[in-house]
Image (spheres, rainbow, N blue to C red):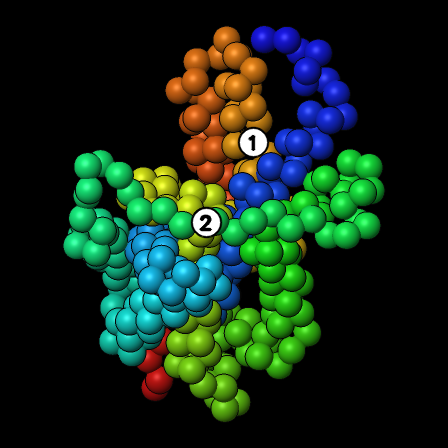
Amino acid sequence: MDWSHILTLAFLGNVLAASLRLATPLIFAALGETFAERSGVFNLGVEGIMLLCGLVGFAGAYATHNLWAGVLASALAGALLGLLYAFFTVTLRADQIVAGFALLLMSTGGAIYFNRLIFPSRGGTQPQIEAFPVIPVPFLRDIPVIGQILFNHTLLTYLMLVGVLVSAVILYRTRFGLRVSAVGEYPQAADSVGVSVVFIRYACVVIGAALAGVAGGYFSLVDLGFYADTMVGGRGFIALALVVFGQWNPVLVLLGGLLFGAVEAIQQRFQILGSTIPPQFMIMMPYLLTIVVLLLGRKRRAPSALTVPYARE
C-alpha cells in the first residue's frame, strides 16, 4: 500500500467527508434512542425498526416516485412501531429487554417477509430508485477542505446536523426536556408535581422510533437506491452503543458518530488502496470499537429509572 496517498490533506478531507456521510444514519438512530433512554425506556429493537422502515421508505418512494414520501413513510412506520413498543413497556409494564428483543425479531422477520411479498424476485434483479443526490451548498462548498467535509452532502445529512442542534435545545432549554430528564431520573417525584410519566415516555419512545425509521430509510433512499435485507448490518446496535458513548447528550452523540464513521471510512479506503491488512479484520473495526465503547461505558451513569417500569402508587 502506498502511504504517500494517505499522508495528504486531500485524503484526510475525503475521510472526514465520508465519516459524516457514514455517520448520518447512526446519529439519527442514536438521537432518537437518546430521547427514549433519557425518559427511562431502553429500546433494544432499534436494529429491526431501521430494517423494516428502510423497506417501508423504499416502497413508499418507489410507489410515489417521490423520495420525501419515502422519508415520511419511514418516519411514520417507525412512529407506529414505537407506539406499539410503548404500549407494551409503558402501559403494560413489560420487561424492556424482552419486549425490545421481541420487537427486534418481529421487525427483522417482517422486513424480510414483506420484501419477498411486495418485490418478488425477477431473475435476481432488485427494483431500484434514483437516490437522494448530493447538493453542495453554494459558496460554502468552495472553502478549502472544510467545504468538502461539511457542505457537500445530501439533504438528509444536513437535516441530521440540524436535528442534533434541535435535540440539544429541546433537551436542555425547554420545559419538555426538563420533564424528560425528571421522568428518567425520578419518575415518582415528577408524577407528584403533575408531570405525566406515561405521556412523556410515550412521546420519547415514539420520537426515538421515528428517528430510527428515518435512519433505516437513509440506507435505501440515500446509500443504495434499493432495499437489501443486509443493508443495516448491525448498525442499530452501534447506535445503541453510541448513546452510551455520548453520555445521553446529542452533541456528544454527534462527535461519537463521527468517530464511528471515521473508523468505517478508513477501513473502506484502506481496502481500496490495497492494504495488506486482512479485509475481514478491517470490516470488524467498527464492531470492535462498539465493544470497547460498551466496556468503557460501564462507568458512565445512565438515567436512574432506565428500564424500570413505573407504576403510579
Whether residue 142 is visible here, answered yes or no, is yes
From the top left corner, tell me how far across and down residue 100 is, in percent. 29, 58
Residue matched to label 1: 265
**In the image: residue 56, left or right of residue 250:** left
Foreground label between 1 and 2: 2
Please give left or right for residue 261 compared with residue 112 in the image.
right
Task: Quadrant for residue 114, please give it.
Answer: bottom left
Q: Amino acid at mark 2?
A: Glu
Q: Is residue 258 above or below residue 305?
A: above
Depicted 304 relative to depicted 262: above or below: below
Q: Residues within 10 Å of mark 1 (few under 14, many from 20)?
A: many
| Near-viewer residue (105 or 308) | 105
Rendered view: 88 above or below 282: below
Q: Quadrant of the N terminus?
A: top right
**Residue designated by label 2:** 130
On the rendered structure, is 262 left or right of 295?
A: right
Which residue is located at x 60 percent, y 38 percent? 19
Give the residue drawn at x 47%, y 49%: 131
- The spot of residue 21 in percent (x, y) is 57, 43
As shown in the figure, which amino acid type bears the numbered disc 1?
Ala
Q: In the image, what residue occupies the spot 18% across and 48% down?
A: 120
Residue 280, image quadrant:
top left
